[in-house]
Amino acid sequence: MALHVFVGSWLAAHAFLLVERLAGIEWDFHPDAVTYVTDYNSYVDDIANMPNNLYFFISSLLGGNLPALIELNIIAYSLANAVGWGRIRQYGRACGLSSGRTLVAAVVFLLQPYRLHLGVHVLKDTLIILMLLLTVSVAPRRMWLAAAALLALRVSAVIYFVGCLPRRLVVGLLVLVSLALALTMQSQEVIGFLISRNELDMGGRNFNTVSSFEDYGAAGTLMRGALWPLLLVTGAFWLLSPAMTLLPIAVEMIAGRVALARVRIDWLPILTALGLMAMLVNSYTAYIRYCYPLVCVLPVLGLQMMARNKT
C-alpha cells in the first residue's frame, strides 16, 4: 500500500472537513447522516437486520459518536486512495500504458471532489467504495470478505458486479432479460413491479429537476434504465438540473471521460449496471449516490480490463 498516498489523503480530508465547516456545511447536511447517528437502535436489535444495514451496526458499536464515525470514513477514504493508486499503477504497467497516461488515470481517481465530500460525512458510501474497490482488485480467494461486507452495506450493490462482468456474459444477460420482458410484459405482476418503482420515496433533493418519467408508468421505469446512465457518465444531467450543488459532480464526470479517453473501458457492462440501478430508484439525486461507487472506480476497472485483454 502507498503509505504516502494514505497520509496525504488523510491530511487532505481533514483540511477539506475544516473548509466545509467554515463554509457552513455541517455534519447533518445529508439527512441520512442524522439517521445513522441518532436512530441506529431501530436497526440493530436483530442480527438478521444486518444485510443492507451494516453501517447502523457500526454506528451502534461506536455509540453514535460523531467524531469517531467521521474519522472512520476519513480512514476508509484514505485507504481507498492508497489501494486505488497501487492498482492503477499495477494495471497500467501490465497493459503497457505509458507512465504519463497511468499517472493521469491515478490523478483522476485521487482528485474526485464528490468522493472527498462523502468521505467527511457520516454516510456509508465511502465504505461501499472501499469494499467495491477491494472486491474487484484483490485475489479471488480473498475477495469474498470484501464482497460480503459490500452487500451488508448495500444489498443492491450486487448490481455493481454486472459492471465487472465480461462483455459476452452481459450480452447473454441482456438477451435473457429482453426475452423475459417480452414474454411477461402482459403479466400484471411484472407491470405492477415496474410501476411500483415509480412510487418510491427516495428522499430526493428539491433542486433535482431531472425527469423520472413517472407519468409513463411501467414504460417510464424502462426509460430511466435507458437514459439516466448516459446522463450520468457524460455529466449531461446538469443541463437538465443546473443546480450549483450538482455542478462539481457533473464536472467530475466530464473530466473523467476526457482524462480516460485513451483507456479502453468496455461500456456495455458499466451502462447495463447503471441502467439496472436506474430502474430501481426514482430520484436522480438518489441515483447519483447509488451509482457513484461504480462510476468512481472506473479508472481502476478500465485499466484492469485492458490488462486482462492484453494477457
Image (cartoon, rainbow, N blue to C red):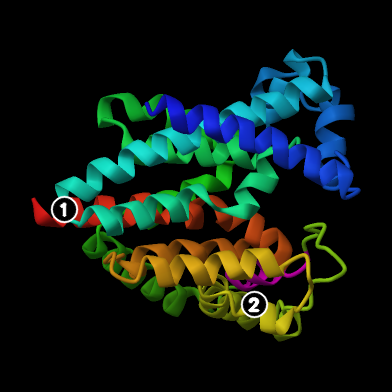
Q: Is residue 93 visible?
A: yes
> Which secondary structure is most common in the magenta stretch?
helix
Depth order, front residue of 220/262: 262
Residue at the disc numbered 2: 237
Depth order, front residue of 177/97: 97
Bounds of the magenta segment? 188-199
**Location of residue 145 by image quarter:** top left
Image quadrant where one finds the N terminus: top left
Residue at the disc numbered 1: 95
Measured along the vertical axis of the image, is residue 156 above or below residue 73?
below
Name which residue lies at 62% across and 53% down. Answer: 113
Left or right: residue 139 versus residue 149 is: left
**Location of residue 253 by image quarter:** bottom right
Left or right: residue 64 versus residue 275 is: right
Q: Secondary structure at mark 1?
A: loop
Residue type of the residue flagged with mark 2: Phe
Q: Residue 72 colored magenta?
A: no
